[in-house]
Image (cartoon, rainbow, N blue to C red):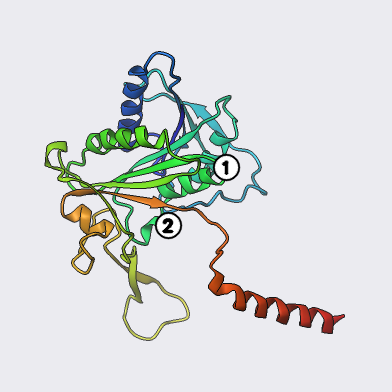
Amino acid sequence: MRILITNDDGINAPGIAALTRATSRWIERCPEGEIREAIIVAPNKNYSGMSSAVGDVFDHPSVKYKKQKIEGADNIQGYALDAPPALCAILGAVGSFNFQPDLILSGINAGANVGRSVLHSGTVGAILTGAQLGLSGLAVSTNWGENVSYEPAADIAIEVLEVLLHAPQRTLMNLNVPNLPRNEIKGVKRGRISTAGIVKSAKSGTGGPLDDEGELKLRLGAATPELGDVSDEDADEDGALIAAGYASLTPLRGPHEDSDMGLSDLMHMSLSVIERHLKEAN
């Protein structure tokens, strides 16, 4: 099994260092006859909130890279790229570094990726991108707070990795871990994606009528690096699980055609209207 490690906080972030060291130990425990290899292809700076964006590759059709290793993981070669996480995932997945991965490990993100932040997260965006190229993936995040410890999340991620090794292609998981010592984490549960959002509202500095030019001050919600108030969530939703001391594991699915049969009439009507307008135009 060949693992591609990336993140959205940048290759110098402590989260990816913890995840890489845990992967390095996993490689060292490789049973005889099994292949375990890993590579890091990660941004050279923070690209948080980039989702699956790749940037303007048409105006900038090249990407600078630099070899870089992480202390305590000498058996894993790293590359720092001037690119967002999704583009790192693509370049790592298509064999640009003479390495063909089977699975992407993304993280460990500094802050939970729960609720609607899943849509905007570069950590999650990397595995969604990998799935379009046939790879399974695990996005890993830990809740923000004082004295963040990434090792518990790294250890749990490796346990999930062992399961993903035998899962179907394009299996995607989002793992969120509370910022607690390993012996204080109550367990892991399947978490539903909540409705918590990064931005709850925004208003001008004065709070009055909008000027021709100004600034909007954002009111941030629960799905921020520090979890915030999750009192309106159900007990099995991802944010509530983290707040209760559980790790939350959520299966994800990348973009795909909506095959809901209930949309058949709507699609037929839309196509008919467009076809009629095209004929009238001719």
Residue at the extreme right: 282
Cα separation, mark 1 vs mark 2, equals 20 Å
Residue 112 placement (x, y as % from top left):
29, 51
Q: Amino acid at mark 2?
A: His
**Rendered residue at 33%/37% (across/down):** 160
Left or right, 21 with respect to 52, comes to left
**Image disc number at residue 263:** none
Residue plotted at (36% across, 29% down) = 20
SS at circle 2: helix
Q: Nearer the viewer, residue 149 or 189?
A: 189
| Residue at which label 1 appears | 133
In the rendered view, would you say 70 is above or below 163?
A: above
Q: Which mark is residue 120?
A: 2
Residue at the far left: name it: 184
Check disc 1 and give the amino acid type: Leu
Measured from the top left, where is residue 5 in percent x and y? 43, 34
In the image, taking residue 161 as reference, residue 266 lies left or right, namely right
Q: Quadrant of the C terminus?
A: bottom right
Of tags 1 and 2, the one toward the viewer is 1
> Mark 1 falls on what kind of element?
loop
Q: Quadrant of residue 274?
A: bottom right
Classify residue 97 as left or right of residue 103.
right
Nearest the camera: 20 or 71?
20
Residue 196 picture quarter: bottom left
- Residue at 30% x, 34% y is 159
